[in-house]
Image: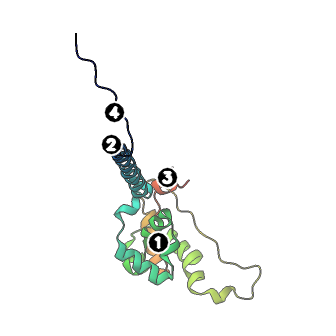
């Protein structure tokens, strides 16, 4: 006849249940630690991809723009930082009106409608019916000099040129 099985051991004050407690505690702790690391990793990558264009921004250029425009960068979103990174200052623009060949009628109209009213605002002071135009729309096929003309105007009046791309406007996160 086989020997009888040993009687079950009672768990009491002797501390025999402690190894089970610490084992299960460490298992739960390890699982929670892995979940926390995974959550932090997902959050990090979501923040990094929030402003995809912002990952390529030149921060020295951004600080120069912040200083010149008196903007506090602390409260800016990633999209606003992306827009500011696409601003070109007038002193950084290489093209001028002399570099644009031909199309003298367009250059004369731009000079009359945009440049002179901007550089001489005293002409319009006190006149209620005479106001400078709000803007000009340049349209045409690619490669006809629209952007070059806009950059030359920004340089002439000492303004800023904002290089807006369709990706910036149609970004799924920003509208």
Distance from disc 1 to disc 4, alpha carbons, whole Å, reads: 83 Å
Mark nearer the viewer, 2 or 4: 4
Q: Secondary structure at mark 2?
A: loop
| Residue 75 appears in the picture as rendered | yes
Per the model, the C-alpha gap separating discs 3 and 1 is 21 Å
Q: Which residue is mark 1?
A: 161
Residue labelled with disc 2: 16
Circle 4 — which element? loop
Residue 97 left/right relative to 77: left
Of callouts 3 and 1, which one flags the residue occurring earlier in the amino acid sequence? 1
Q: Earlier in the sequence, mark 1 or mark 4?
A: 4
- Whether 15 is drawn above or below 68: the answer is above
Front position in the image: 62 or 164: 62
Picture coordinates of residue 105, whole percent (x, y): 51, 69
**Is disc 2 in contact with disc 4, using a CB cutoff of under 8 Å?**
yes
Circles 1 and 4: CB distance less than 8 Å?
A: no
* Viewer-nearest of discs 1 and 4: 4
Q: Which mark is residue 96?
A: none
Q: Earlier in the sequence, mark 1 or mark 2?
A: 2
């Amino acid at each position: 006849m086989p020997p009888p099985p040993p009687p079950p051991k009672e768990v009491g004050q002797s501390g025999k249940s402690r190894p089970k407690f610490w084992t299960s505690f460490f298992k739960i702790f390890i699982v929670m630690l892995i979940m926390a690391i995974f959550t932090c990793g997902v959050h990090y990558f979501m923040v990094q991809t929030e402003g995809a264009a912002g990952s390529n921004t030149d921060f020295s250029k951004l600080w120069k723009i912040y200083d010149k425009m008196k903007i506090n960068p602390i409260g800016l979103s990633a999209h606003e930082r992306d827009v500011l990174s696409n601003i070109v200052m007038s002193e950084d623009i290489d093209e001028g009106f002399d570099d644009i060949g031909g199309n003298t009628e367009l250059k004369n109209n731009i000079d009359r409608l945009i440049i002179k009213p901007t550089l001489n605002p005293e002409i319009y002071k006190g006149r209620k019916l005479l106001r400078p135009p709000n803007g000009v729309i340049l349209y045409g096929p690619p490669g006809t000099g629209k952007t070059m003309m806009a950059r030359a105007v920004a340089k002439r009046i000492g303004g800023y040129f904002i290089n807006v791309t369709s990706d910036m406007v149609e970004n799924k996160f920003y509208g």
